Amino acid sequence: MGYRIAVVGATGNVGHEMLNILAERMFPVDEIVALASRKSLGTEVSFGDKTLKTKDLDTFDFTGWDMALFAVGSEATKKYAPIAAKAGCVVIDNSSLYRYDSQIPLIVPEVNPEAIHDYKNKMIIANPNCSTAQMVVALKPLHDRARIKRVVVSTYQSVSGAGKEGIDALWDQTKSIYNPTDNPPMDQFTKQIAFNVIPHIDVFMEDGSTKEEWKMMVETKKIIDPSIKVTATCVRVPVFVGHSEAINIEFEDHLDEDEARDILREAPGVMVIDKREDGGYVTPIECVGDFATFISRIRQDSTLDNGLNLWCVSDNLRKGAALNAVQIAELLGRECLKKG
Ligand SMILES: NC(=O)c1ccc[n+]([C@@H]2O[C@H](COP(=O)([O-])OP(=O)(O)OC[C@H]3O[C@@H](n4cnc5c(N)ncnc54)[C@H](OP(=O)(O)O)[C@@H]3O)[C@@H](O)[C@H]2O)c1
């Protein structure tokens, strides 16, 4: 006995990865449906060795479906997630719409699986922001050992974090630089992204930080511990897939870099690649298609009493979105919606 699963936003970057990961991890599926906007009606998407024809989300009836994995952005989520939840289908949402609602659990299964039971409050579970998801996987085991006081993080976020249009923008701009006769590329980003970096993701807040930076702060508190202070600078870089983060951590207790490396080696979802030699670290291109959050460059920060620096890389479409959503579905099945 398996589950009846809806993948909502199946023609997008995250929806595409959700279908791949459900198949790769042999999620127990009895029936699966791919949903997107009306313009994608009939568009074919792959699920393992099967091909699914996309259906129209607007006219879909969620009655009798167990779980819906949403990856459609906040506006469409606002309209359709309550319809699915009301029909008794548990929504696992990738947008930011529900993340800060105290009634709705925000879950990274390696970090706070116990929050899963709160799905009953509204039949909705939120997935964190891509840059938060990989960071909390690295922080939690270190926090359990030495209590984190403060985190200073700088991100290097790939264009796929801005959806299909982000990928197209980098591709088209890069081509147009070599071939200026091409049609002028669309400007998905606020400045040129090809051969450049942009210190601006999501909208500006009143205090001068951006919403992406705010999300990392608020979501880390909700997922791990409200006492952890986070300050972030989020930067878009001309990389197609894979977010990187330079993380500085201040602890209450002393934590030696060798012990930190050992703790991270044992931590769920983490892969440590940390050789102090040329190439002895992970870069985004190497993490694409992988499930793990990779940690490299673990070293003491000699400017703090109890400080460490590390480098954290993960596939943003996987751990940052689709993989985390599928892991939540697995957890929900195991703990709450047992079959058979
Ligand atoms: N990319 C990441 O790294 C990442 C990480 C974490 C969270 N997220 C979140 O995941 C969501 C999806 O991101 P993405 O990168 O996959 O975006 P995307 O590639 O642009 O895909 C968007 C998907 O949503 C569908 N859609 C949009 N509006 C719709 C509507 N009104 N009705 C039905 N379907 C609609 C699109 O269908 P059509 O093709 O028919 O238009 C498409 O399938 C967003 O909320 C994003 O913030 C993304």
Image: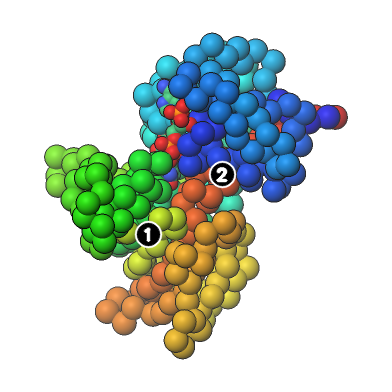
Determine if the C-beta at disc 2 is less than 8 A from ligand 1: no
Residue 278 seen anywhere in this rendered image of the structure: yes
What residue do we see at 74% from left, 33% from top?
A: 29
- How crowded pointer 2 is (Cα within 10 Å; few <14, some 14-19, many 20+) is rated as many
x and y percentages locating residue 333 in the rendered image: 71, 34
Give the image quarter of residue 268: bottom right
Query: Residue 239 shows which numbered tag?
Result: 1
Q: Residue furthest bottom?
A: 277
x and y percentages locating residue 147 in the rendered image: 44, 62
- Give the image quadrant in which the ligand numbered 1 is located: top left
65 left or right, relative to 77: right
Q: Nearer the viewer, residue 337 or 274?
A: 274
Give the image quarter of residue 163: top left
Q: Is residue 141 above or below residue 99?
A: below
Q: Earlier in the sequence, mark 2 or mark 1?
A: 2
x and y percentages locating residue 250 in the rendered image: 35, 67
Amino acid type of the residue that numbered disc 2 sits on in the rendered structure = Glu
Dot 1: element = loop
What residue do we see at 53% from left, 21% from top?
A: 41
* Residue, disc 2: 17
